[in-house]
Image (cartoon, helix red, strand yellow):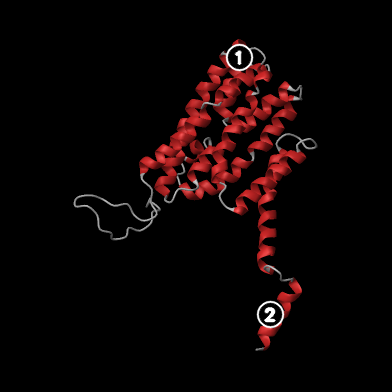
Amino acid sequence: MAEQTTPLRATAGPPGGSTLAAGTKPDSAVVRDALGVGIAVGLSGFAFGVTSAGSGLSLLQTCALSLLVFTGASQFALVGALAAGGNPYTAAAGAFFLGVRNAFYGLRLSQLLALPRALRPLAAQWVIDETTAVTLPQPTRRAARIGFTVTGLTLYVLWNLTTLVGALGAEALGDTDAWGLDAAGPAVFLALLAPMLKSTTERLTAALAVLLALGLLPVLPAGVPVLLSALSAPVVLFLLGRAKGHGPGRTGTEDAGATRAEGGR
């Protein structure tokens, strides 16, 4: 399958050397970025292992969650609900709703990566927040595939290893609630996401999403507030679109009058 790359432009280069096409990115840079995210987030699997064991799950149950579910937020939501004395079915439903977002990631990544059909079921296991965050900004299909693969592999291996270590070491830490380790995973992802919020639209969307999630958290089941916070994106875009359409100091009536005046000339 042909790679989705930007056409090469003729540029002068050193004799015998090679130049990168405009808009491309060196493979080494993609690998470096992917490893950075994979290692940083993968190490937080230790927090999940400790939290899960402290919530009463066995070593086998804890490791099975990381191996088979492999979406940190849903895993933390499940063990957190169980630790609070929630019904197992309710806890599982909340974790499921929280993991629904990965299905939407998959719709975009499937077009971008265009993997062979045989590999898609395997790649689906790695469709999570972090792999999506690394893959989407890549300028070419080759870079997107490298970013997705390196991030997914690094994170999957480290997350499961540190989950095992955390579950085994839970007893040595004593009261796991006192350490606040259940917040480690989300905190790491927010730290990685924050530098990507560069425009006013992105910052407003993130701020509104946080307000929606926190405001709805006390009244809705676990996982639902996160899904509803996604409504912040269309709301912000709609409001900004209206603001730009009217322009500073102009009302909808003035705009309509100007349109009629232009039509009469």
Measuring 74% from the left and 71% from the top, which residue is drawn there?
251
Measuring 44% from the left and 34% from the top, which residue is drawn there?
35
- The amino acid marked with disc number 1 is Ala
Disc 2: which residue: 259
- How busy is the neighbourhood of tag 1: few (under 14 within 10 Å), some, or many (20 plus)? some
- The amino acid marked with disc number 2 is Thr
On the rendered image, what quadrant is the C terminus found in? Answer: bottom right
Pick out the residue farthest to the right: 219
Along the viewing direction, whichever of 50 and 245 lies nearer the viewer: 245
Q: Is residue 107 left or right of residue 245?
A: left
Q: Is residue 143 left or right of residue 12?
A: right
Disc 1: which residue: 170
- How busy is the neighbourhood of tag 2: few (under 14 within 10 Å), some, or many (20 plus)? few
**Is label 2 in a helix, a strand or a loop?**
helix
**Residue 190: x %, y % from top left:** 59, 37
Number of the label disc, if any, that sits on residue 103: none
**Is label 1 in a helix, a strand or a loop?**
helix
Measuring 44% from the left and 39% from the top, which residue is drawn there?
33
Along the viewing direction, whichever of 201 and 53 lies nearer the viewer: 201
**Residue 120: x %, y % from top left:** 49, 41
**Residue 105: x %, y % from top left:** 57, 44
